[in-house]
Image: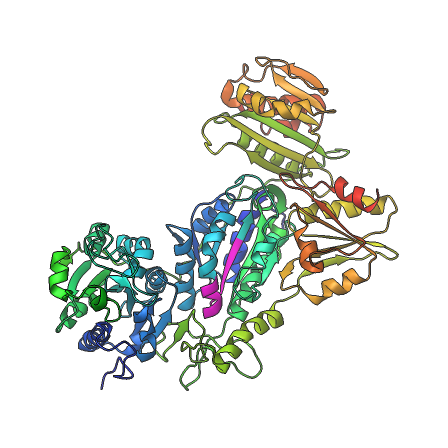
Amino acid sequence: MSSILVTDDLPYCPGCTHHHVTRQTAKALEKLGVSPQDVVLVTDIGCHGIADAVFATHTVHGLHGRSTALAAGIAMALPQGKKVVVFIGDGGATIGLQHILEAARMNVPLTVVVHNNYLYGMTGGQPSGLTPPDFRTVIAPEGTHLPHHNLCELVHEAGAAFAARVVGLGDFSPTLAQAFATDGFSLVEVLEMCTSYTPKLNPEFRLRRTAEAAGYALGTWPGPSRPAFRLAFGQTSASLSKTLKTVVRREKVPLPGRFGLLLAGSAGEGVQSAADSLARAGVAGGLHATKKGSYPVTVGVGFSAAEVLLSPEPIHYHGIGQPDAVVVTSQDGWHWVKPRLASLSSGTVWVDASLPPPETKARVEVRDFRKPFGAINAARCALATVMRETGVLPEPLIQLFDPAHRRS
Amino acid sequence: MEERWTLVDGSRLITESLVKAGADCFVGYPITPASWIFQYACKGFPVALAAPDEITTLQWMSGLAAVGHLPVTSTSFPGLALMVESLNMAYMMELPMVVVLVQRLGPATGTATAGAQGDLRLVTSLISGGYPLPVFCISNFEDCWSLPPVALATAAASRTPVILLTSKEMVMTHRDTDLANLPPVHPVERTFYAGNEPYVPYACCEDSPVPPFLPVGSGAHQVRLTASTHDCRGMIQHTSPEAMANTRRLQTKIEALTPAVYELFEQESAETLVVSYDITAEAARDAVAMLRRRGIPVSLLLPKTLWPVPSVYLEVMRRYPRVVFAEENLQGQLAHLLYGAVLPPGVRKVTAVGAMIPPEAIVAEVAP
């Protein structure tokens, strides 16, 4: 009596090689002396997937082609000694090829048993990525004339600890046992025959002969010895908030209402950190503050812009419709902010002296932001100038980020 | 307690709050505007994994949940779209997990760095058959800290994936915060099957519609999980009465156990109720304050549990002849979710795409 199977009555078509794969799997696990409760069988869609019911192991039945990824999530979190076995078809292996390669690359400790009968059986006999070029299927009665994937070589190249290809005849349980005993990713591809579709369309079909003709080499592909991928739970994680730089609140700044500022400059010129410093200075002055950045996907080039909102009251809505100040420190920033300037009807636009005068109904102030301390400090210099001239923040708070003060 | 003021973004609060609540693994892949959560998770979670794609993300999470962990991911619409089948699998297997969905401007890849509230109708229809998946929505900065534990607790208690909805402007804006003032987060309490009888994975006790959980790989009992229609033992069935009862139970448990989380600020003699959620809820708070300062009575409902809809929302809305919905999408998705295809007279929408709705727009609708 098998310890792995609950019945000898398997649910497959008469003559289907799946019978043999199921029994050989059970035999290999029994040879290794593994308890069924130390085995997790992960299956997916396809005739092989109905094997769950006959196994005394844990069973998880997932989505077509995704069983290897699902099994990887299980296997990487289980302790050594547990065996995770994936049953997948050639169709599922085609759908989930990325999952198989990724598990091999990571060396997740599991064994993928590929039931390669050269077609999708459950759905009516369609070709898969493992179908030989001349193999006839329902929707490709002349064959696909396309080469099949060589799964064993693919996983070997991806870093599998062990791969093997066998014909589904005779006793191949030693090969399966070798795979199951491997502490790392292993794959065993079993070449099979679907009795429902193959003989009708391929009367000349013979397992070994067809495999040879298709270039399906039998054998093993041992991989390099490297640690299996297992997660280490139980570590204490770092507190994200404890590492944050805090702000000491000083005197309360008498700001009468919201002050919204838009800063536009160039990537690499300290725009985001300058805006962050301004917001922090506001918080140091007992104000409430929000700050957000805007930049192109290529973060190292082009414009860099930031919005800072300072308020004596808690901030809920943090949009800045009509900014009180628009500060432009570079050509990139000037081009980015130009459309918005045209719609401004209030506030002040502060532009670096090197830039052309903007077309806007807002007041315009021209200053040197780039010259005094270089481009890298242009944003800080500009914000210090604007805060000083508008009187929004008092001198001690401006000095927290003013490059003139930092240098002295 | 000594004050600890700083600037902090919503992504950081969400991440740390989830960890404190007991989420122990994060599976992520980069997608704007959800990547900050992924980056913080790599520092803050006990285990963080970089998955190669969206489907793998949900499959790994399902595997991790199956062996007893509480996984989290963050994504945006393009990623969620690819996760839908796997989310259905986790729902059917009854595996707990949290998906933080950071909305951005669509359709398709849209504008990755622009906010939006366009995915509500999507997340309320994710499960084939119309079965409800709990959806909670972060509606202010404080929610970034307080709502993730609710989402995680619901996932664990109901054995289900949960969507935690938010949007770009909520998670990528820095804001002044007194860290010392953040309320404590209590870890989610989980219990596992400890009986001596063989474990029946989808059998419930009489007092709960949620079956006790036992991790796959347990040395004590066999565990069967399946995404296909199944009976209480986890055996695949076609449409047997037992299997269909089990499938119906999925809806029953979510409706029964999803907590109703909302804020309600009613004002005496108010004829108008403003309803808003997500980032626009912030504008709605300001709008209501502005109206009240002008002497216009108005009430405010901020739903945080968006799906399944708590009946209390309908009770509140029925009390007002005018209900104004404010949400950053073109259709008024919450309004139609609550009222159907045709909005009754008195129900108005303030909508926008491509920009946040300012408080003034809500004020103008309430008191033109």
**From the viewer's perspective, is residue B206 above or below residue A248?**
below
Image coordinates of residue B189 in percent, x first then y, are: 52, 70
- The residue lying at 68 percent from left, 65 percent from top is B310
Residue B54 part of the magenta segment: no
Tell me: B212 left or right of A171: right
Mark yes or no: residue B328 visible: yes
Left or right of A50 in this view: B125: right
Judging depth in this view, the residue of A215 and A111 nearest the camera is A215
Nearer to me, B300 or A134: A134
* On-image quarter of the N terminus of chain A: bottom left
Which residue is rendered at x = 30% and y = 54% of the image? A97
Question: Residue A362, how many percent across, how many down?
Answer: 72, 21
Mark yes or no: residue B94 visible: no
Of residues A25 and A277, the one drawn nearer to the viewer in this rendering: A25
Q: How is the image coloured?
A: rainbow
Q: Above or below — where is B4 with respect to B311?
A: above
Task: Name the image quarter holding residue A271.
Answer: top right
Q: Quadrant of the C terminus of chain A?
A: top right
Measuring from the top left, give residue B86's x and y in whole percent.
44, 60
What residue appears at the point 55 percent right and 58 percent down from the top-left corner?
B163
The magenta stretch spans which residues? B88-100
Viewer-proximal residue among B36 and A150 = A150
Q: Is residue B98 magenta?
A: yes
Q: Is residue A173 above or below residue B73?
A: below
Report which quarter residue A215 is drawn in. bottom left
